[in-house]
Image: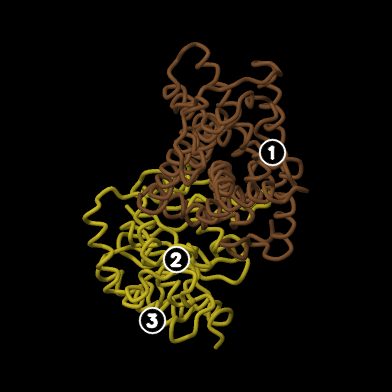
Chain colours: A brown, B yellow
Amino acid sequence: MQLFLEYLFNGISNGAIYAAIALALVMVFRGTGTINFAQGEMALFTTYIAWGLTTKNVPVILCLLIATAAGFVLGAVTERVLIRPIERKSLLATLIVLLGLFLVLNSLDGILWGNQNYTMPSLFPNAVSSFITLGGARLYWANLGLWIVLAVLVGAMFQLFNHTRLGLHMRATASNRESASLSGIPVGRILMLGWGFSAAIGAVAGVLLTPLAPDSLGVGEMFPILIQASAAALFGGLDSPGGAVIAGLLMGVAEALLSGYVSVIGGQLQEAIAFVAIVVVLLVRPQGLFGSKEVERV
Amino acid sequence: MSLLEIKDLRGGYGPSLVLHGISLHVNEGEIVVVLGANGAGKTTTMRAIAGLIARKGSITLDGQSIIALSPDKVVGAGIVLVPQGRGTFAKLSVEDNLRVGAATRRDRAAVKDDLERWYEVFPRLAARKRQPAGTLSGGEQQMLAIARALMNRPRLLLCDEPSLGLAPIVVREVFSLLTRINTEQKTAMLIVEQNAELALAIASRAYLLEAGTVVSEGTAESLRDSDAVRRAYLGY
């Protein structure tokens, strides 16, 4: 029971991160129609910014806020400068540009901060003894804090989508872009905001995730997470924000339990789970759990 | 001065020109219909006015040039297009569709009143408020598209083939609603239509397009009686 709970807690933490990044991917997909391959690298870049500030003794909470703002700007600028001029040409061109951005940001991380790994201080108490005991299992404050912050963040995003004027305009733009502009919605500005929000979500996820393990801030940190989150987004349905969150959590928990109990998978084959999930979803239910049918063409 | 004044409008898709200098006008509170065969440039004219395609020439609303405005700014200026194919936000509820129509408005209370007003005029929409708009029938979606456009309180309503794909009885219903809205709200309308007889019946003036130019214009009556229109579009 104790072991199960510890696996479960880890799974929920990873799952919350996958869910957050998957939500960010879905937000971009609904507006622009592509998977943002650079989503993980944007999150990593802003996490480096936060880490850089912590080394200058800036309080972690302030670093988180600055990284979130930086993420928002990075996302919005990416849409305005890189995506908008290209996307009229073709979807494929947009994908290539995003792959390019992935490489540029990754190399930039290396140039600016070097290739060694760093340990990121946590927003929450993060000593070996900072845990509460639940059913005999240890639940660390850093994990619990991550759950709460991401739950609040995701809740706020859903509130925005479903109960605000801006959210309505975002949904309208995602549903039918031309019709949205014929209704007087400034579609460009809406897309830019969507990209900004999604990169800001990534920044929060990065800053909360990195302190969970020592030495985890490095240039390769986010790529595996992007793969897992993409699998989650696909699994939940690429155009369904709720689906992305549920699938992200499921993936995190399934991964933790499988690698804990099935010794063949262990720590080595963890990432393979995501690939298996992608293949199975594409074969069995291409629109995902909660997605709509027309997404199949992607 | 006319409400909408178009002079020498040229435009098209990419390098190929579809409109070769169209001039027309719509007066305050008037219904004007644009007739023409497939490929005459009717839809392109509408899309050019709405700002969806590159265009040259002059388009003014109340004497103010709107030729350089983006589609959302054209809406802000008071011209709303009900596009061909209706442009339904399929996954949004009927009510959300209507709210999107009020995107440029800030007067919340009045938006609410308008919602109620259009539910009264279009009772079938009221019965389906919470339903995803994509599940409505073609006729209901056409009514939704018109109601959505009206939520903006436009000065000029552009309707691109409102009868497309609808059963004759529904077409008559749509046209009688358009007439009612024109009488009650004094909303000016520019309607593109293949169903010439029906359109001429509710319009006061009409233009006939052929290959991207205006070949004939006049009162609805005079066009109904003209041999060219009769032969080509009325079939008798």
What chain does badge 3 belong to? Answer: B
Disc 3 marks which residue? B173
Q: Earlier in the sequence, mark 2 or mark 3?
A: 2
In the image, what residue type sits under mark 3? Glu
Q: State the image coordinates of residue A241 (x, y, percent, origin top left).
A: 51, 53
3D distance between C-alphas at marks 2 and 1 = 51 Å
The reply to whether callout 3 and callout 1 are in contact (CB within 8 Å) is no
Q: State the image coordinates of residue A62 (x, y, percent, origin top left).
A: 42, 22
Q: Residue at 67% of width from left, 21% of height from top? A: A117
> Does label 1 lie on the same chain as label 3?
no
In the image, what residue type sits under mark 2? Cys
3D distance between C-alphas at marks 2 and 3 = 15 Å
Res. B227 visible in picture: yes
Disc 2 marks which residue? B159
Disc 1 marks which residue? A224
Q: Nearer the viewer, residue A216 or B29?
A: A216
Q: State the image coordinates of residue B129 (x, y, percent, origin top left).
A: 35, 70
Q: Nearer the viewer, residue A173 or A40?
A: A40
The reply to whether callout 2 and callout 3 are in contact (CB within 8 Å) is no
Q: State the image coordinates of residue A145 (x, y, percent, origin top left).
A: 44, 36
- Where disc 3 sits, the SS reads helix
In the image, what residue type sits under mark 1? Pro
What chain does badge 2 belong to? Answer: B
